[in-house]
Amino acid sequence: MAIAPITGVNPRYPMPAYPRGWYSLCDSDELAVAEIKPIQMLGQEFVVVRAEDGRARIYDAYCPHLGAHLAYGGTIEEGNIRCPFHGWQFSAADGQCAAIPYAKRIPAKAALTAWPCDERNGLVLVYVDPEGKPPEWSVDTLPELSDPDWIQSARLEWTVKTHVHEALENIFDTAHLKYVHGSEDVPRIDKTNEEPGKLEFEIRGDAEGGSSDLDIKLWGLGVATLRYKIEVPLFEFDTMTPLDEERVLMRSRIYLRDLGSAEANEAVSQEVTKTLLEQFDADIQIFEHKRHMAEPLLCDGDGPIPVFRRWTEQFYR
Ligand code: FES
Ligand SMILES: [Fe+2]
């Protein structure tokens, strides 16, 4: 069945609550083989399934027959999802109805609604589009995740009453760094690459120039990487998924270069985690209570917020 456009707006954030793009529904290690997992995100009821072939797939949660939720009592049997209510079976590979145990003929339209799914970088990603169109770009594979020199030190998670736009615009709002985060320097931001759906830029703490301290890459408003080129290099892999019109689930996975000893890794990990939690807590208080100014009153000392906003228009139109 065709996917209906998904819509919704939060009065504090007057743009669509579910901008076009890829969003993480769960981490791959949260979905076992033969599992049907209920996921309430993006204002939808999804099921994420992993049949015996090991591939993740995403469907609408409700059976098209009489509306049972497939994750509550449904099972996976020989490549099919079996509905708990009347035993209809749907191919886990494409959602087509494969069998109805008590019918002579399978109705032509009997199929689960399948969502574009890409399992990559340890995430199960869904693509949503305000007009129901198919994906035109994808998230890239991240080399750090398969490089033994990088070790994962933490996975942090927040549920925040905000919009996915906000956490990313915050990076371009350089003036707030001093007043919210206590930083002395105003960094410089330069765009280094732009492709459909993607944006890369570098940030230098020293406004005079010099080499980049931080390389950031965004895939839509749902996936981001931050490569900190500091004394102890850090790789941060972030996902942001709207849960509904009010709340966003944010996850940060922190990777460190292996320092060669468990104690050293642990000490750096704790320090980094503490700093990130403190810094993000300071932002959350602002995010949860502010509203989006479609026409902000900016001054010459503000960061390149309009550059970011122009880039985001492709996800809202
Ligand atoms: S509701 Fe699923 S088989 Fe009837
Ligand atoms: Fe901030």
Image (cartoon, rainbow, N blue to C red):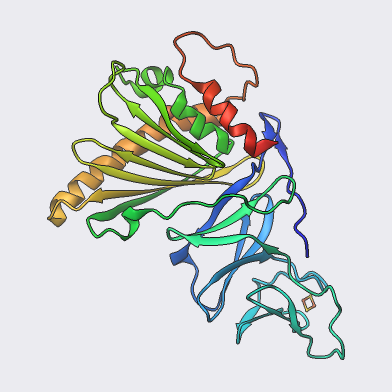
Name the image quarter holding the N terminus.
Answer: bottom right
Front-lying residue, 116 or 154: 116
Q: Is residue 186 left or right of residue 299?
A: left
Question: Taking 159 as reference, is 113 left or right?
Answer: right
Q: Quadrant of the C terminus?
A: top right
Q: Residue at x 86, y 79 (%)?
A: 107
Residue 142 percent across, percent down from the top left: 38, 53
Residue at image point 56% right, 41% down:
196
Give the quadrant of ligand 2: top left
Where does the image place residue 90, in percent across and percent down from the top left?
A: 71, 78
Q: In this picture, is 109 found above or below 159? A: below
Count of picture labels = 0
In the image, residue 238 above or below residue 122: above
Q: Where is residue 84 shown, x and y percent of the image?
A: 71, 79
Please name the residue shown 46% across and 25% down the image: 172
In this rendering, position of residue 218 left or right of residue 134: left
Check the image and report above or below for 238 versus 316: below
Left or right: 63 in relation to 275: right
